[in-house]
Amino acid sequence: MAGGYVPQPQGIEALVAQFRKTDKELAILRKMITGFGLTVDPQGNLIYDGSGKNIIIKGGSNLDIQDDGSANVDGSMDVGGTLTVTGNALFQGSLAVPNGSIDNPALAHPITPQISYADNNGAAMPGTIGADLASGTLAIPAGFSQVATLCTITVGTTRSSSTPDGFAIQAWTEMQEDPANWYWVSSTVSTMCPGNGYTSFTISGVGLYSDIPSGWHLKYGAWVAANSSGGGWATSATNAHASLLALFFR
């Protein structure tokens, strides 16, 4: 009948009513999503831009993103891509990683060795008080706070007198910034030099330092002293060599 109601096939009215109801519910849902700062981009990604609001995912794991940018994960989390941490990372439990999967120097190279040498040739034999005839310095590498040391020294000299006499030597290490409290020395060893003759002697000393302040320096050397004040040592004929093997630990 023209201008009047055209009866719909059976069931169409119910389908149209359902579409209208669904469209109304979607409009309400879109309004709710927009109100919480959620949008869906053309690629289907759900984007959250709700300043001042948190996202809390309930279930097996909870993800709580705070307004200050911090996030709390209560449960397990799998990261399939690259995890970039620009700040500090604190692990209060155990950290298990496959061998070779971390190339950060602090983990891949927790120990670094260094070797240093110091020589003094043609020196005069010190008196009975003694003196350091050869010494050197190593800077503590950045990021390291412990070191194990092996200092080896060799001292040789000549007697110009026919009377034999002896001298004492000692290998030592210390922290240059506080040598009174940070030092290790070997036993003091004496040896005899024959009259009008030459002799040399070698000893080693070990040291261990921990909790070293940043920026400090490790010093080492060879201490030498005459056993008596009688003289008789050849002029400028004492040679001292000191070598240091240092293993730095983080």
Image (cartoon, rainbow, N blue to C red):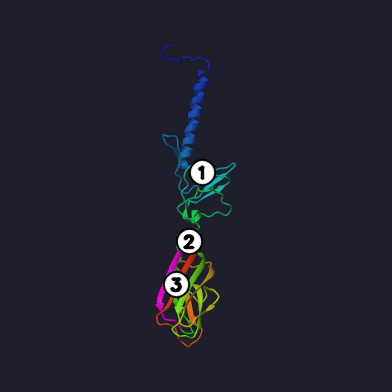
Q: Please report contact status of discs 3 and 1: CB closer than 8 Å, yes or no.
A: no
Image x and y of residue 162, in percent: 47, 85
Three-letter amino acid code at the position of disc 3: His
Residue drawn at the location 48% of the way across and 26% of the way down: 20
Q: Nearer the viewer, mark 2 or mark 3?
A: 3
CA gap between label 2 and label 3 equals 20 Å
Question: Which residues fall within the magenta stretch?
Answer: 112-126
Residue 148's label in the rendered image is: none
Q: What residue would you read off at disc 1?
A: 79
Prevailing SS of the magenta stretch = strand
Q: Please report contact status of discs 2 and 1: CB closer than 8 Å, yes or no.
A: no
Q: Quadrant of residue 160?
A: bottom left
Q: What residue would you read off at disc 3?
A: 241
Q: What residue would you read off at disc 2?
A: 113
Element marked by disc 2: strand
Q: Nearer the viewer, mark 2 or mark 1?
A: 2
The N terminus sits in image quarter: top left
Q: Is residue 119 inside the magenta stretch?
A: yes
Three-letter amino acid code at the position of disc 2: Pro
Q: Taking 222 as reference, is 76 left or right?
A: right
In this view of the protein, which residue sits in the foreground, 135 or 96?
Answer: 135
In this view of the protein, which residue sits in the foreground, 180 or 40?
Answer: 180
Image x and y of residue 165, in percent: 50, 83
Element marked by disc 1: loop
Residue drawn at the location 44% of the way across and 73% of the way down: 135
